[in-house]
Image (cartoon, rainbow, N blue to C red):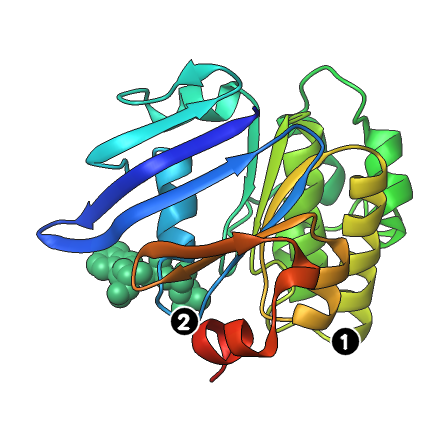
């Protein structure tokens, strides 16, 4: 098992956001974390990374219990996080940003540039001046340069131009074919479901359903995913 989240409860101050989330993923799997807005997807991700640590329950990653580990140590166990929202890049150019993240492994600058040719073309451009979609590619590229065992993508395609979204989905499919384990949150089910091996649905801070994409019936959709 690569990642095992067991019955976690997580709070923001006094306010409880997660009330029992379970999630298990094997190496090489792509798992979609689903649910309507505010149901706890980002909080689950923050808890996995110990950015907002769970108060109870347990999380193990790559065979190690992560409770009480500082977030940077969890990251070093091999989690590459691409968080939700706009990324803040330092005044480095694209190339420098990628190289700064590098750790040894199969993901090299050449491979990242091949995955995202737009980044290669803009290698000397200051990262702050990239478009939103290019910044998202850079965020994914940086995460890959750390050679993670698990890549976590939280709404990686949200708010981007359609052509860029397609490029990012194509990259995700390539990463899956390459055998990378990916935990992904995304609202575009038509792209998400074909790439997912397994889905976990959250409702009000609890995992309420899990199964294969093909097992998501109309009833499941209406109950947990409809707007
Ligand atoms: N920093 C915070 N402080 C207090 N409450 C928060 C904070 N972040 C999230 N929450 C609350 O925790 C709950 C779960 O939010 P979370 O962002 O994890 O949901 P989500 O499923 O990722 O939703 P979205 O798709 O809208 O990002 C919500 O009730 C939200 O208001």
Badge 2 element: loop
Image location (x, y in percent) of residue 50: 34, 33
Q: Secondary structure at mark 1?
A: helix
Pick whichever, 211 or 14, lies toward us: 211
The mark closer to the camera, 2 or 1, is 2
Vertical comparison of 102 with 36: above or below: above
Instruction: Name the residue tied to disc 2.
Output: 37
In the picture shown, does residue 2 fall above or below 138?
above
Q: Position of residue 148 (x, y in %)?
A: 64, 27
Would residue 163 appear left or right of 212 to someone viewing this image?
Answer: right
What residue do we see at 54% from left, 75% from top? Answer: 221
Can you say whether 85 is above or below 222 in the image?
A: above
- Mark 2 and ligand 1: say if the CB distance to the nearest ligand atom is below 8 Å: yes
Ligand 1 shown in quarter: bottom left
Taking the view exactly as shown, the residue that stands out farthest to the bottom is 227
Horizontal and vertical percent position of residue 180: 73, 34
Q: Which mark is residue 162?
A: 1
Q: Quadrant of residue 67?
A: top left
Does the closest atom of ligand 1 sit within 8 Å of the Cβ of label 1? no
Taking the image as shown, residue 57 lies to the left or right of residue 150, namely left
Q: Residue drawn at (51%, 36%), measured in percent from left and top?
A: 24
Q: Nearer the viewer, residue 128 or 34?
A: 34
Q: Quadrant of the N terminus?
A: top right
Distance from the alpha carbon under mark 2 to that under mark 1: 22 Å
């Amino acid at each position: 098992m690569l990642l095992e989240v067991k019955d976690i409860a997580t709070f923001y101050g006094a306010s409880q956001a997660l009330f029992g989330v379970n999630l298990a993923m094997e190496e090489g799997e792509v798992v979609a974390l689903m649910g309507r807005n505010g149901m706890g997807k980002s909080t689950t991700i923050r808890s996995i990374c110990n950015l907002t640590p769970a108060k109870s329950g347990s999380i193990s990653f790559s065979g190690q219990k992560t409770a009480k580990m500082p977030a940077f140590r969890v990251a070093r166990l091999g989690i590459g996080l691409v968080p939700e929202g706009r990324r803040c890049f330092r005044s480095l150019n694209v190339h420098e940003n990628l190289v700064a993240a590098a750790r040894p492994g199969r993901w090299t600058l050449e491979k990242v540039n091949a995955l995202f040719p737009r980044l290669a073309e803009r290698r000397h451009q200051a990262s702050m001046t990239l478009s939103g979609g290019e910044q998202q590619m850079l965020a994914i590229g940086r995460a890959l340069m750390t050679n993670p065992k698990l890549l976590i993508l939280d709404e990686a395609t949200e708010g981007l131009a359609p052509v860029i979204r397609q490029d990012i989905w194509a990259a995700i499919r390539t990463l899956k074919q390459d055998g990378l384990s990916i935990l992904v949150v995304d609202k575009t089910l038509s792209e998400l479901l074909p790439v997912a091996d397994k889905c976990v649905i959250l409702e009000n801070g609890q995992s309420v359903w899990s199964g294969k994409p093909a097992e998501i019936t109309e009833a499941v959709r209406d109950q947990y995913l409809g707007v």
